[in-house]
Image (tube, rainbow, N blue to C red):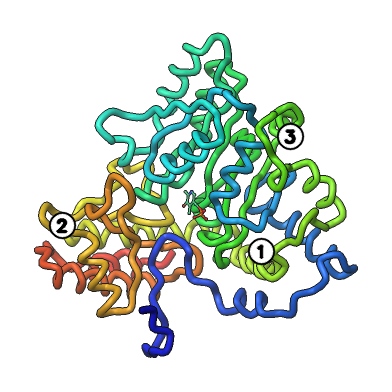
Amino acid sequence: MLQLNFHRSGRHQLAIPGPSPVPDRVARAISLPTIDHRGPEFAGLGLKVLSGIKTIFKTQQPVIIYPSSGTGAWEAALVNTLSPGDHVLMYETGQFATLWKKIADRLGVKTEFIGLPDDASWRRGVDANLIEARLREDSGHAIKAVCVVHNETSTGVTSNIKAVRDAIDRAGHPALLLVDTVSGLGGADYEHDAWGVDVSIAGSQKGLMLPPGLGFNALSQKAIAASKTATLPKAYWSWDEMLEMNKTGYFPSTPATNLLYGLHEVLDMIAAEGLDTVFARHQRLAAACRAAVKAWGLEIQCLDDACHSPILTGVVMPAGIDADAVRKIAQEQYDTSLGQGLGKVKGKIFRIGHLGECNDVSLMGTICIVEMSLAKAGVALKSSGAVAAMDVLKNIA
Ligand SMILES: *Cc1c(COP(=O)(O)O)cnc(C)c1O
């Protein structure tokens, strides 16, 4: 039975790679009274967040904000740009790419999953050459969209999206580029316009430090043009009414007003810290986390040094150790949540989130808890990861 009447002192350490901890000032903003979403005050809020979010995607194009999870934003990207039976090329980076493919399959488009042999794709970034080669074969241009995950949250691998764009261009192929940056946005550098992305998909509860409940689609003119002829059924997700109403700061149906207060606050916070400073903070914390894993003598799920995620680190368990047993110790004994292994790596890895409202203090707390939990689970540690992480964090630029 769920017990809601217990008390543990201090704060729960939410070290999963999303939802990430919500900063107090964001929680306070969200607690303001809900206003009339058709009233005069609302337009100011609507216009401010609709324009502010563009700076995070680094785009001049419209960004749609749905009351939805990231999954809804995946669906929105597909139903607005595709027609039944369209061929879609998707790249298997991990569990989130797999789930996105499942959505596409259910919607009735023809999906093709590519990747490296033997599940190597779950440990490396997208190989853009595979995409280029496949598109070159498609001389009849049957493939209507290429779908890739920017930051694969199930593995801790961040792919080079510009390289995918370049591959599509080298192949001279007109397919749209749809990118899931649900967990990347706001933590890893992302450039919707400069990288030539047609639809970027994001959510509120990862790098944007909000509770779950907002889904985003950043668009391109090419994507908007495609939405005018695409015939997959779309009603709630349809961009056309959103784009029209958003011009005046309003929404066709009730927006998540209080989450938009939170988004307003987050945009102010990111502007104050500076987007590039936010990215550098994530890189620094991620480097410290990897130093800890290496010092423990454990493997990092990502094998490609160019693709380590700044958002999270996947920690591979030695043979005979159940990653979920380590997580259980952290949860029950130290009030700390670690991310579980998903899909093909269930029980084999756990994930440490270092995103959003994360700093040296919170990361060191997590690493110390992980170190104790690993030892208690019977993992023979080579040396102290906490000491190794401190060695990285001591060097303040
Ligand atoms: C969290 C996540 C999603 C799914 O978002 P939900 O809000 O859980 O629906 C999709 N893709 C990636 C990469 C994610 O991290």
Q: CA distance from mark 2 to mark 1?
A: 39 Å
Sequence-wise first label, 2 or 1: 1
Instruction: Check the image and report above or below for 343 versus 161.
Output: below
Q: Quadrant of the N terminus?
A: bottom left
Q: Nearer the viewer, residue 178 or 322?
A: 322
Instruction: Check the image and report above or below for 153 versus 130.
Output: below
Q: Which residue is mark 3?
A: 224
Q: Which residue is mark 1?
A: 267
Residue 11: x, y in percent? Answer: 42, 82
Question: Residue at the location (57% across, 79% down)?
Answer: 24
Kind of residue sitting beneath label 2: Gly
- Residue 191 visible in the picture: no
Q: Which residue is mark 2?
A: 297
Please state if 46 lies on the left or on the right of 53 as rendered.
right
Residue 108: x, y in percent? Answer: 55, 31
Kind of residue sitting beneath label 1: Leu
Q: CA distance from mark 2 to mark 3?
A: 49 Å
Q: Quadrant of the C terminus?
A: bottom left
